[in-house]
Image: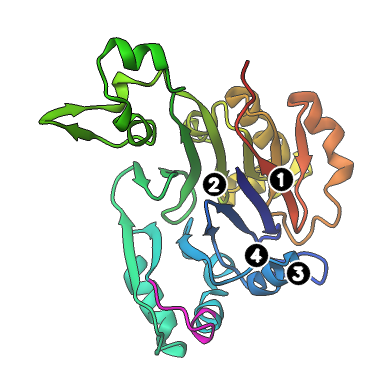
Amino acid sequence: MLDVCLLGTGGMMPLPYRRLTSLMARFNGMSILIDCGEGTQIAIKEKGWSFKPIDLICFTHYHADHISGLPGLLLTMGNAERKKPLVMIGPRGLTHVVNSLRVIAPELPFPIEFIEIQDMEETYTFNGFCIDAFRVQHNVTCYGYSIRVPRTGKFLVDKAREAGVPQCAWNRLQKGELVEVDGVLYTPEMVLGEERKGIKVTYCTDTRPVPMIAKHAEGADLFICEGMYGEPEKKAKAMEYKHMTFLEAAQLAKLAQPKELWLTHYSPSLVRPEPFMDQVRQVFAQARAGEDLKFRQLDFEDED
């Protein structure tokens, strides 16, 4: 089960009714934060979630509206007497950027482990889930992310017996471990069927529509994508500043075919996104206007 919450949906500046873009997800007792703009802490509090389980923060890029809330968040986590390491992932320069911001949050009771993305696409594996980072097209180096929860195949008793796997090894093999019994090594493939469909959430913002995005959002349970401008006539402005319109995001969703599309990262000039959504749904029917604290709980598909 993966819980997903849009903490904020605004771009450029926070507004009284819209905080800056940030996403929080929870899985297996661990929380993942993508971006940390001004107001992120307040949104987490309003949602009723905790700062303490945040073990991973991913940054799309280093414009202020995506990272300016970090020093305050680090101080809050430190005041909660956190001791275990905090992992951060981001484009090259992450270590320098964060340490510069820490001039105003110098003393923390926990270490920070930095992972700087080097290539166009990279995958990182954590406790039961994966993070896929993929390069997008903004006016600075910027990445989108997918959070994936893989699902192993079903345990097949007949297959295990035919392979001569001792019953004492079944439980550990089902969990994906290698097991040695009496000098014989047994592998999970000896007792499991084909890998089943997992859970995937793809998130990208501050970018032009590029094929890399559709590739990574393909078949996602939830695709959260920038829609800076609702007005189609603002496409030229979107192109100039390397952003997207609602319709461009919908075209990406049409290519990727996720179960659902949420739009986010609205321009301060866009007061209400909903009036533009009928036109968006003509391109991709399962499009929704994101809003602060919009929440979804995702689970594995039921099987016969």
Instruction: Confirm whether residue 43 shows in the render.
Output: yes
- Between circles 3 and 2, the one closer to the viewer is 3
- Kind of residue at badge 3: Glu
Q: Secondary structure at mark 3?
A: helix
Disc 2 marks a residue whose amino acid type is Thr
Secondary structure found at label 1: strand
Q: Is residue 93 visible?
A: no
Q: Earlier in the sequence, mark 3 or mark 1?
A: 3
On screen, residue 125 above or below 195: below
Q: Amino acid at mark 4?
A: Met
**Closer to the camera: disc 2 or disc 1?**
1
Lower sequence index among marks 3 and 2: 3
Q: Is residue 221 magenta?
A: no
Relative placement, left or right, of 265 versus 178 is right
Q: Is residue 62 left or right of residue 272?
A: left
Residue contact between numbered discs 1 and 4, judged by CB atoms under 8 Å? no
Number of on-image labels: 4
| Labels 4 & 2 near each other (Cβ < 8 A) | no
Indicate the colouring scheme: rainbow
Which residue does the numbered mark 3 point to in the structure image?
A: 46
Q: Residue at x 52, y 74 (%)?
A: 70
* Mark identifier at residue 201: none
Front of the two marks 3 and 4: 3
Q: Which residue is mark 2?
A: 207
Alpha carbon distance from label 2 to label 1: 24 Å
Q: Which residues are magenta?
A: 77-84
Q: Position of residue 98 (x, y in %)?
A: 40, 74
- Residue sitting nearer the eye, 7 or 186: 186
**Image quadrant where residue 223 sits:** top right
